[in-house]
Amino acid sequence: MIVILIHRGKNHYIDLPYYGNKIAKSKGDTLYHSVPPFSFINQDSANFNSSSLKGKIYVAQFFFTSCQSICPIMTTKVKTVFDHYKVKKDFNIVSFSIDPDVDRPSILKDYRKKYKINEENWVHLTGNRDSIYSLMNTKGFLLLQPNYSPDPAELTHTEFVDLIDRNGHIRGMYDATSEKEMDRLMDEIRLLYLKDLESNGKN
């Protein structure tokens, strides 16, 4: 549940944390860790560049289509979040395959059909494995240090997803196998939108 702080007749919403290392600048400003630029291939064999996410709120997920453990649970629960916010054109889900050698665009397309994902603002991406793994860990989404194995049963992956704000900062991490955590994710997405309203009201 979102906490609203009342001060002198105005609503003030609690802020979400910033994840990753912070760098203090000389003028007192702070630089926060941000997700680096990336470019991969989507389910339609088209290039997808992170520049298309600029100024948008999105959730990042790592998965692979042959996963029989946590991935089906994750996708189902993330879809519940997506269905709640999909009408907002500035909200996206970005799912990265950690098994790109298998998960070609046609496989990703079949996976989307299986889960009835048709909207353009949820993309499934594949590409260079090293680039995806680098993006997943300390250089990008701060989720996990992957360890590739040719055996899909031994692929290292994570049940956590990230919430990214309009400036590319990580503002939340959530266990996507947990209904309670997905409720928290929905609340905190809403909080980012409420903060937009509060900021616009000050302008």
Image: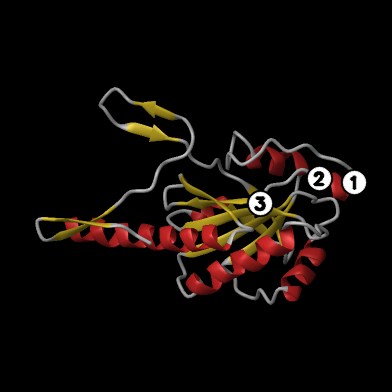
Amino acid, disc 3: Glu
- Give above or below for 83 relative to 36: below
Q: Which residue is mark 1?
A: 151
Disc 1 marks a residue whose amino acid type is Asp
Q: For the C terminus, which image quadrant? A: bottom left
The image's mark for residue 184 is none
CB-based contact (under 8 Å), mark 2 and mark 3: no
Q: Which residue is mark 3?
A: 159
Can residue 88 be seen here? The reply is: yes
Element marked by disc 1: loop
Side of 152 relative to 33 (left or right): right
Mark 2 vs mark 3: in front:
3
Figure quadrant of residue 194: bottom left
Q: CA distance from mark 2 to mark 3?
A: 13 Å
Disc 2 designates what residue?
A: 155
The location of residue 155, given as percent across then percent down, is 81, 45
Q: In the displayed structure, would residue 80 be above or below residue 56?
A: below
